[in-house]
Image (cartoon, rainbow, N blue to C red):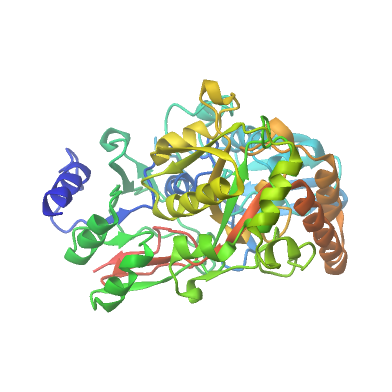
């Protein structure tokens, strides 16, 4: 183990050619949950890319820990013409990391690119008559119909961050990554120090001006960078990461595995707790473009056998304080209901699942399941799910891959003989699955949508009705009907919600609630 630790840490923490001047530079070393394989936040829904994006880019708005949007890059906005015209005014002093000022035309180009890629952007685009710059500091959204969610979708916490970048980069086609990572956020990405599979480096952007008002809360309020430098150190081996944290070689480990939590909790130099109270939704996602999962009867056949507690124990350990089962298509919150839940909560019946699979017309087609060896929680859930598929009667080919390969391959719409896939397990923020507005996994927009590509005009019509509904009771009724329909169509299978502890050294203070953020942090 000693040799393994030296090898991994030596590769990941080799002395860089460039460091901030002065012996007292405040450097924080962080171990992310997986390698940062993709840098452009519009190219993937991987959460590690989302976390990277919020270091580098800023957004027009930001939601607080209660999911309420607040102005961020904008000084404020005015709504006119009965909600059909929004005029957003940018704050003074905004600059990109290349030294250029942030202008309204940069915002227009950035949002225009995001609109063609994001699932909320798909909602806004048909309602948008014109997006334009009126001078250097005013951005205008002229709408065909009112869209009161505008600040929320421009400041949301889910993947595909509506990142503002220079117009010269934002003209890049939204299906292709931008050639440079240039934002206007509190830290700038040091491209020359990136080592794929090993490290990513960020330095404080001296010209960043935080908001002068508000209270820091998740993505809202002043973003004050007290650290000079943040180094992401990829350490796939959990024991190595735990050892590095306890010795002080790294300062923060994003996702400790359950087996090592007791050791970390006993260490007086560490603080270990759950920062994201909503937790993570785990899900089994099917590729619905090809057999066998293009057949809803095949997908439904799994439901009698799925035991969410098994998946959650694999991801988060035996202590039920760290997970919840009995999770439907709306995660715990005001829109959750019991509609159709017997499919997952009735006594589990493997024989019934096997009989349903035989009756479905499944012809023994090969089922390729990808599992990332270097992403502990997803790897554990995937192995449980692959074993369940075998028990039910599927012809499973398990392919162990690294996380970077998985996030590249799950975008492939090719058949299996050309590098495609059949099923993957994923985790996503449970906060974004509390209702159908944000839940990208429920979208039924086919090849335009999220990997898996289910197509369901029925689900889309109900989602539109949810978005237009004016009261909570109506929305709850729509969500109940959507959940019942989802148990018929099975766009994915919910596997439970788990609450991921994170662990850091006690000389690091200022963590905000939510996913990993690096402003507001201090290191003594």
Quadrant (top left, top right, bottom left, bottom right) of the C terminus: bottom left
Q: Nearer the viewer, residue 6 or 124?
A: 6
The image shows residue 320, relative to residue 431, as above or below, that is: below
Residue depicted at 38% across the width and 69% down the height:
510
Q: Indicate the quadrant where residue 458 lies.
A: top right
Q: Nearer the viewer, residue 349 or 110?
A: 349
Where's residue 523, x and y in %? Answer: 27, 66
Q: Indicate the quadrant where residue 360 lies.
A: top right
On screen, residue 5 versus residue 76, left or right, reads: left
On screen, residue 77 versus residue 23, left or right, reads: right
Q: Nearer the viewer, residue 442 or 492?
A: 492
Where's residue 466, x and y in %? Answer: 83, 55
Residue 158 in sight from this viewpoint:
no
Residue depicted at 65% across the width and 52% down the height:
493
Q: Indicate the quadrant where residue 367 lies.
A: top right
Q: Nearer the viewer, residue 467 or 360?
A: 360
């Amino acid at each position: 183990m000693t040799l393994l630790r030296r090898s991994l840490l030596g590769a990941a923490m080799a002395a860089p050619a460039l460091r901030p001047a002065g012996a007292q530079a405040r450097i924080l070393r962080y171990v992310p949950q997986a390698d940062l394989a993709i840098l452009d936040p519009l190219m993937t829904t991987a959460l590690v890319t989302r976390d990277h994006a919020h270091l580098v880019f800023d957004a027009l708005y930001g939601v607080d820990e209660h999911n309420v949007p607040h102005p961020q890059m904008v000084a404020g906005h005015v709504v006119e013409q009965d909600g059909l015209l929004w005029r957003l005014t940018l704050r003074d002093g905004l600059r990109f990391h290349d030294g250029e000022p942030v202008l309204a035309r940069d915002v227009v180009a950035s949002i225009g690119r995001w609109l063609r890629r994001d699932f909320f952007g798909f909602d806004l685009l048909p309602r948008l008559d014109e997006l334009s710059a009126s001078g250097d500091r005013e951005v205008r959204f002229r709408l065909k119909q009112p869209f009161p969610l505008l600040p929320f979708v421009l400041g949301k916490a889910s993947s595909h961050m509506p990142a503002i970048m220079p117009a010269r980069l934002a003209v890049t086609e939204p299906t292709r990554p931008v050639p440079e990572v240039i934002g206007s956020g509190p830290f700038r990405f040091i491209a020359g120090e990136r080592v794929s599979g090993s490290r990513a480096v960020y330095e404080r952007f001296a010209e960043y001006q935080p908001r002068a008002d508000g209270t820091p809360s998740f993505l809202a309020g002043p973003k004050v960078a007290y650290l000079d430098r943040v180094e992401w150190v990829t350490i796939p081996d959990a024991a190595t990461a735990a050892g590095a944290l306890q010795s002080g070689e790294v300062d923060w480990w994003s996702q400790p595995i359950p087996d090592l939590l007791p050791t970390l909790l006993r260490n007086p130099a560490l603080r270990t707790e759950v920062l994201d109270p909503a937790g993570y939704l785990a899900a089994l996602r099917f590729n619905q473009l090809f057999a066998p999962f293009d057949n809803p009867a095949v997908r439904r056949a799994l439901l009698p056998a799925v035991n969410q507690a098994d998946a959650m124990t694999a991801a988060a350990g035996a202590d039920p304080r760290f997970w919840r089962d009995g999770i439907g298509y709306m995660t715990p919150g005001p829109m959750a209901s019991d509609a159709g839940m017997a499919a997952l909560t009735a006594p589990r019946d493997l024989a019934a699942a096997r009989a349903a699979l035989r009756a479905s017309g499944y012809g023994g087609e090969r089922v390729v399941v990808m599992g990332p060896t270097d992403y502990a929680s997803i790897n554990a859930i995937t192995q449980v799910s692959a074993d369940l598929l075998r028990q039910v009667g599927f012809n499973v080919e398990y392919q162990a891959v690294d996380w970077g390969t998985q996030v590249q391959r799950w975008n492939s719409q090719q058949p299996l003989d050309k590098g495609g896939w059949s099923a993957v397990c994923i985790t996503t923020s449970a906060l974004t699955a509390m209702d159908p507005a944000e839940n990208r996994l429920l979208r039924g927009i086919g090849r335009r949508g999220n990997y898996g590509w289910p197509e369901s005009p029925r689900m889309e019509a109900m989602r539109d009705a949810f978005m237009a509904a004016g009261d909570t009771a109506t929305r709850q009724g729509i969500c109940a009907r959507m959940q019942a329909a989802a148990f018929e169509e099975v766009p994915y299978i919910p596997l439970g919600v788990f609450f991921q502890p994170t662990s850091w050294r006690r000389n690091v203070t200022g963590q905000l609630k939510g996913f990993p953020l690096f402003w507001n942090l201090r290191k003594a």
